Image: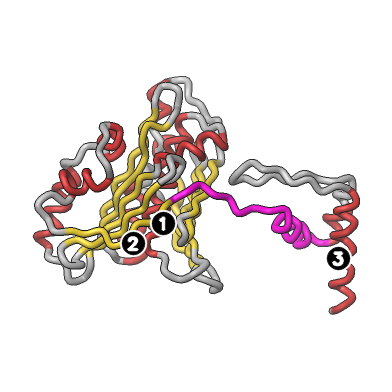
């Protein structure tokens, strides 16, 4: 596997009494940090959100499906969005990428600088209309918010553990997470064991930084002495699917009057990868002409 890629593991615990999703997103978070020149606080937010959406993408089964996690908050950090599809492609951006707090320790306190706010989960299943669920942020630390979303919106008992570890220069040492869901037929005693194990497990990113793989962490800490298996592994990568054609279609949606006001040309920027697409005066005229032809056919 490429060093620039991540891993998503999907599995089951105790003969399918629990669903298991585990991910190493270190390379993905590093790519996001580099693309957006993120400061430490938004790096932690983005890292947790990327890990969470990677884990949740394990549910996707239909072709052309994707899931988005979006935080909208009133605090100075404001929020972020991360999107993952069934193929393992992830993209994301933070609303305040260069937010810096004067007190050094404050640059580790994500929830404190988000609340109050909301977590939205948007599922696009194939070509169907997207489904959106939303809850108020519990503490803004992302793991407990995602768990609360499943509890409130889908009535599914869920445990989530997310971690992002940086060095003093904000380079990513490790990032990843684990998500475990209890199925209706699950033995409550097993749920208690898993919950206790999770509470006694050191931070996932710290363990990864010590050289442990996701499988090691599951075997030695979270699922020790339990039967479990991995049934599928997906390679994760940071990938933006923007294109000049997509931006052109988006410009057409603005309508003729808006396009007329842009006749000197524009250079829209993709939020997810910072790539710019230049449309000069001739390009804008061609878009206006295309709109006119559409109107003539109606």
Q: Along the polypeptide, which appears first: circle 1 or circle 2? A: 1
Instruction: Classify 10 Å Cα crowding around label 3: few (below 14), some (14-19), many (20 and above).
Output: few
Residue of label 1: 135
| 252 falls in the magenta region | yes
Q: Residue at x 11, y 53 (%)?
A: 193
Residue 67 appears in the picture as rendered: no
Asked whether the beta carbons under mark 1 and mark 2 sit within 8 Å of each other, the answer is yes
Q: Along the polypeptide, which appears first: circle 2 or circle 3? A: 2
Q: Residue at x 33, y 47 (%)?
A: 143
Asked whether the beta carbons under mark 2 and mark 3 sit within 8 Å of each other, the answer is no
Above-or-below relation of 119 to 275: below
Q: Nearer the viewer, mark 2 or mark 3?
A: 3
How far apart in space, not on screen, are marks 1 and 2 (Cα)?
A: 8 Å
Q: Nearer the viewer, mark 1 or mark 3?
A: 3
Q: Residue at x 52, y 33 (%)?
A: 38
Q: Residue 92 got which mark?
A: none
Instruction: Classify 10 Å Cα crowding around label 1: few (below 14), some (14-19), many (20 and above).
Output: some
Name the secondary structure under disc 2.
helix
| 117 falls in the magenta region | no
How far apart in space, not on screen, are marks 1 and 3 (Cα)?
A: 42 Å
Instruction: Classify 10 Å Cα crowding around label 2: few (below 14), some (14-19), many (20 and above).
Output: some
Give the residues in magenta.
Answer: 236-255
Above-or-below relation of 191 to 24: below
Q: Residue 290 got which mark?
A: 3
User: Can you say which quadrant of the picture contains the C terminus?
Assistant: bottom right
Does 38 sit left or right of 104 as displayed?
A: right
Q: Which residue is more in the foreground, 24 or 4? A: 4
Residue of label 2: 152
Q: Which residue is more in the foreground, 80 or 15? A: 15
Question: Residue 80 at x, y = what percent?
Answer: 51, 45
Above-or-below relation of 169 to 174: above
């Amino acid at each position: 596997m490429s060093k620039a890629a991540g891993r998503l593991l999907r599995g089951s615990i105790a003969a399918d009494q629990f669903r298991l999703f585990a991910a190493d997103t270190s390379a993905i978070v590093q790519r996001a940090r580099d693309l957006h020149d993120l400061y430490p606080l938004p790096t932690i937010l983005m890292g947790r959100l990327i890990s969470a959406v990677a884990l949740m993408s394990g549910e996707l089964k239909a072709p052309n499906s994707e899931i988005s996690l979006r935080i909208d908050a009133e605090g100075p950090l404001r929020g972020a969005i991360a999107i993952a599809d069934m193929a393992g492609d992830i993209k994301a951006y933070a609303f305040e990428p260069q937010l810096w707090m004067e007190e050094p320790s404050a640059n580790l306190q994500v929830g404190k600088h988000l609340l109050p706010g909301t977590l939205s989960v948007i599922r696009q299943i194939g070509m169907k209309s997207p489904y959106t669920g939303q809850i108020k942020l519990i503490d803004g630390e992302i793991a407990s918010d995602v768990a609360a979303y499943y509890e409130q919106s889908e009535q599914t008992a869920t445990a989530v553990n997310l971690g992002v570890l940086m060095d003093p220069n904000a380079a990513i040492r490790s990032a990843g997470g684990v998500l475990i869901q209890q199925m209706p037929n699950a033995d409550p005693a097993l749920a208690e064991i898993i919950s206790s194990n999770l509470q006694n497990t050191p931070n996932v990113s710290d363990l990864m930084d010590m050289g442990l793989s996701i499988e090691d962490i599951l075997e030695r800490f979270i699922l020790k002495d339990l039967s479990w298996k991995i049934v599928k592994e997906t390679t994760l990568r940071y990938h933006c699917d923007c294109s000049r054609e997509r931006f052109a279609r988006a410009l057409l949606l603005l309508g003729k009057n808006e396009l007329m006001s842009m006749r000197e040309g524009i250079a829209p920027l993709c939020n997810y990868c910072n790539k710019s697409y230049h449309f000069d005066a001739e390009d804008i005229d061609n878009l206006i002409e295309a709109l006119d032809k559409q109107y003539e056919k109606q």
